Every structure is written in structure tokens, then in C-alpha cells.
Image (cartoon, grey):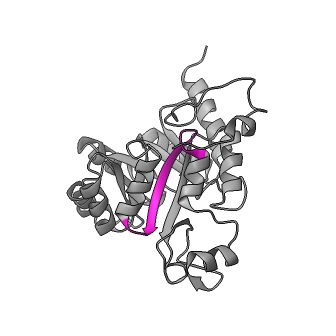
Amino acid sequence: MTGGGLPGFYYAEATCFMRRRPGNGAGGGSVKLIAHRGGRGFGTDNTLEAMEKAVRSGVRIIETDVRSTADGQLVICHDSSIWGHVVRRTTYDEFKRIAPDRPLLSEVLERLAGWVGFNIEIKEAPARDVGLMLNLYGIADDTVVTSFDRDIMSDYRRDFPQALTGYLYRMPYGKEKKLQHALEMGARIIAPHFSSIEASLVDEAHELGLEVYAWTVNDRSDFHRLHDWGVDAIITDHYLEMEQLLKEMSASAHPL
């Protein structure tokens, strides 16, 4: 099942094109660039409108957040509550009434699966339901699925052993234990807050076969430092700015 209507959506971008498998990120370097929170900077966070604009602008990977409503619908929403309503205690009909611009995960995939890569953070939703939805759209093996919740990640890997999963965390302490947790849950990625990353962490993670995704990187000097340390992906609110910076860095490193 794939999204419909996108040829018209892309018409201004090219005279002809084919559905392409999303690449690893922006051109100009090996590090992957990921647009944070459903295309932040391209419109209202975690809305289909922002995501579509991000893809039109050349974004190759979008990070977004999934929660489950009281009646089991998978919705795109970062915070645990919206306009005073706790998402997991709110029916989908009520959720849609108070936040009409927030789509279902299925609506996002219907429009954009196959056109852009996804990094899905499971905030609070059944891991199996998310995986089955990704499977339905044929992108389960190509989608990065992350969570701060180790139980969610362990459940996801149990049900989808080929999945590319990542362990999110914020604080820098307990580095060795965090690496151990990632391995125990079968993760192939650690995703620390950028301020928790140091060169030795990147080296240790790589030695263990783990990739390192840094969030949320919006400063040029932070980007330079993390790039030099060899992180594998950078999640940012300023995708186009960081894409240009990456191209400039690549051109400087490989002059004609």
C-alpha cells in the first residue's frame, strides 16, 4: 500500500520522476540528516502539511512521534497531552476535534511512505501495532524505530527481529550501562542528546557495532564537532541550514 496523489504534489520539483527508495540523507557527506519532530521548521510540528513541505524541499528522512489514543488509534503527537487532554485517555474522535491538524500514522504513511525515510519514535503506543502498520506499507525494514522506553524497544525487536531500532536517552551519566542496555534490547543505534556525546562514546559505540544518532543539533559549531567525531546521523530543527553546512564542509574537504 503506497501513498497516492504525489506526482501532482511533486510536479513543481521535476518534469518527471519515479518513486524512489529514500536515501540515507542529504548529499555532500556520509552523515545522515533527519528533520526533527515531523518537519519542524517547515510548518506546525508533526503535521502532514509540514512533512509534505519538508519533502518538497528535499528532506530525505523525517523523525516523528507516535502515541496511541484511548481507542487504540496511532496518532502523530509529541507531548503526552494536548490542549489539556491526555492522549492515551482521549478517544480518537475527541483528539481529532481538539487537534484537527494532527494526523494518524496511517495518513502520514499513505501520503509519504516510499517518498521519504522515517525515524519513528514510539512515545506511548503498543510496539506491535506500530510495527504492523509499518509492515502494511512495506517499510518496516527500512524505518528506524526508537524509544526512551527499553521495554517498548525489547517488545518491538521480539516481534520484528529484522527491525532497525534505537535507544534514546538524554543524560550523559552511566555511559557503559547505556551501551549495555542498547545491546541487550537488540538495538543497532544509540540516540543520545547531543550534549551527552563525546568522541569516546562514538568510538565505543562503533566498536560494539552501534550507530550514533545525535539530537537535536541546531548550532553550526555543535554540528562541526559531532561530524568530526563521526556520528552517523544528526537530527535537527534546521534541516536546510545543516544540509548546506554539510555540503560546504564536503566541498572544503574535497576541493576541485
**Is residue 118 found inside the magenta-colored segment of the image?**
yes
x and y percentages locating residue 202 in the rendered image:
35, 47
Q: Which of these two is toward me, 63 or 229? A: 63
Q: Which residues are magenta?
A: 112-126
x and y percent of residue 193 in the render? 46, 60
Residue shown at the point (45%, 68%) measured from the top left: 123
Quarter assignment of residue 154: bottom left
60 in relation to 198, above or below: above
The quadrant the C terminus occupies is top right
When the figure is inspected, residue 148 is found, relative to residue 204, above or below; the finding is below
Taking the image as shown, residue 108 lies to the left or right of residue 190, namely right
How far across and how far down the image is residue 52, in percent?
A: 68, 48
**Residue pictured at 54% horizontal, 25% vertical:** 253
Q: Is residue 174 visible?
A: yes
Q: Is residue 119 above or below residue 152?
A: above
The answer to which of 139 and 119 lies nearer the viewer is 139
Q: How many marks?
A: 0
**Is 235 left or right of 160, judged from the image as shown?**
right
Which residue is rendered at x = 63% and y = 31% of the image?
A: 248
Rendered image quadrant of residue 4? top right
Outermost residue toward the top?
256
- Determine which quarter of the picture holds residue 244: top right
| 67 left or right, relative to 145 | right
